[in-house]
Amino acid sequence: MLHVTDKIILQDWELTESFMRASGPGGQNVNKVSSAVELRFEAATSPSLPLPVKNRLRQLAGRRWTNDGALVLQCDETRSQARNREIIRDRLKELIQQAATPPKRRIATRPTLGSKKLRLKAKKVRGEVKAMRGKVDPE
């Protein structure tokens, strides 16, 4: 089980881990040991996630979200398979926690009168600078 928040707990059957050989440094060991981890979380069919969290997770995941509604994360940062498993589970946890917090509603504000006047003055000055760049009269 993976405890994400007080209300969201992922069951083991929802997560699938597969291991493969990692690229990068590791000497002869890199050709023998499958230390890279790929974590697959069937988010679309998960009963643990409420619908709004699923929708926000889909937005946050981007390319990591598959057509069949699974979230696929990969990690080959360290030479240790156990450490890569910890890292990938932490990443999944952080991503779901981020999706679980609803976005703050933006309160529309109007610009102040002073800021409007300052903006128009700056435009006027800039326009005058550009007007002076014209061709010079020979007389």
Image (tube, rainbow, N blue to C red):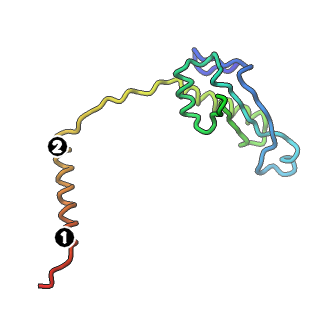
- Figure label count: 2
Residue 58 percent location from the top left of the image = 57, 30
Residue 136 percent location from the top left of the image = 18, 79
Q: Nearer the viewer, mark 2 or mark 1?
A: 1
Q: Kindly identify which residue carries mark 1.
A: 132
Residue 35 percent location from the top left of the image = 80, 39
Q: Kindly identify which residue carries mark 2.
A: 114
Residue 34 percent location from the top left of the image = 83, 40
Bin the neighbour count of mark 1 within 10 Å (Cα to Cα): few under 14, some 14-19, many 20 and up.
few
Residue 9, image quadrant: top right
- At mark 2, the secondary structure is helix
Image quarter hosting the C terminus: bottom left
Image quarter hosting the N terminus: top right
Instruction: Check disc 2 and give the amino acid type.
Output: Gly
Q: Nearer the viewer, residue 82 or 10?
A: 10
Residue 132, image quadrant: bottom left
Q: CA distance from mark 2 to mark 1?
A: 27 Å
